[in-house]
Image: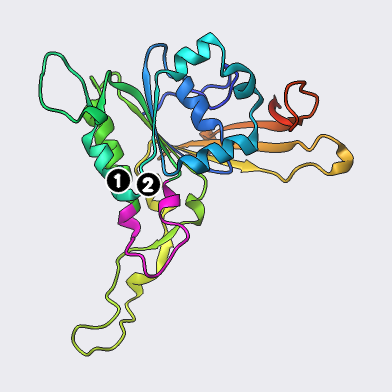
Amino acid sequence: MARMFPSSDPCLPPYKSLIVQGDYHPSAPIHLCLSAPTGAKALLLSSSRQALIHSLREYNDEWLLTESGTGNTCHSSSKVDIFYPPTPNHLVALLSAFRAQEASKPVPVDAKATLDSVPSLLVLHELSAYFLPMNENKPHTIASYLLLVTHALALANFLSPEPQTPMRLTLFDSQLDKLKLPVLRAPTFSMFNGEESSDETSRPESVAFLAHRYFEWAGTFDKSDPDSPSDGSGARRCTLTLHKQGSDPRTDIMWQWSEVPERTHGHYEEPVITFAWS
């Protein structure tokens, strides 16, 4: 079962598409990829290799530090392919180029974008980083973000072997609630009288509201400030709320836990993070 934590529980509900926003733990996309069914491939497409590695090092997930070198984990991680398209255009090109190798259909394909098997999971990581910080001189609009989502959904539908076993799509975006882009990019000057345009379509609008409509489930992470130093633990209380689009909010799934820094781990100077469930 799909999960975003090192323990076998809790597991995510069955889903085809999931968008995750808020202050999620940086190791969540990695745990999700490693939880793919045995032998199944997972694809992780991140906007920045440097940012992903830095966040994992800063967070210091205890399970990844101690278990990533074991046989079972190495076998699972060998089935995870990670790509780092540096711009939205590179991401669109990559999503459009992916193909699964099929011996029965010997068609010309790009060797770098050919997958040895159909993935069971596609993870997009931090798409907002392509558009932040926001700049009036950049040509991006809300459609620029949604275009990336629709290309990913199209790939998932294209590669899914059959409707009963779809390739799941998950988008992690911690800055989505901060991202605002214009609906349309209006011209700076009117083509008729040469005066500066005051079209309100250039006003930035929230991207999150529209992005959520493309996904079956939405997950929102909330995290408290660390406990006071006098407490001694430095733990942070966390909540994940999972909402199925179109359902009654009273049926939402809610998980609560604490992220606890452990300073007694013998192999590491910096504190490592463990999960304590409520």
Mark pair 1, 2: CA separation: 6 Å
Label 2, secondary structure: give it: loop
Any part of residue 24 in sight: no
Label 1, secondary structure: give it: helix
| Circle 2 Cα neighbour tier, 10 Å, few/some/many (<14 / 14–19 / ≥20) | some
| 148, above or below 15, in the image | below
Q: Name the amino acid, label 2.
A: Pro
Is residue 136 within the magenta segment? Answer: yes
| Residues drawn in magenta | 127-144
| 111, above or below 226, in the image | above
Q: Name the amino acid, label 1.
A: His
Residue shown at the point (40%, 18%) measured from the top left: 79
Residue 94 image-quadrant placement: top left
Q: Position of residue 276 (x, y in %)?
A: 71, 26
Name the magenta segment's main secondary structure: loop
Residue 274 image-quadrant placement: top right
Is residue 156 or residue 18 the one in the foreground?
156
Residue shown at the point (72%, 38%) measured from the top left: 236
Residue shown at the point (59%, 33%) measured from the top left: 254
Mark 2 — residue? 86
Mark 1 touching mark 2, by CB under 8 A?
A: yes
Left or right: residue 233 versus residue 251 is: right
Is residue 63 within the magenta segment? Answer: no
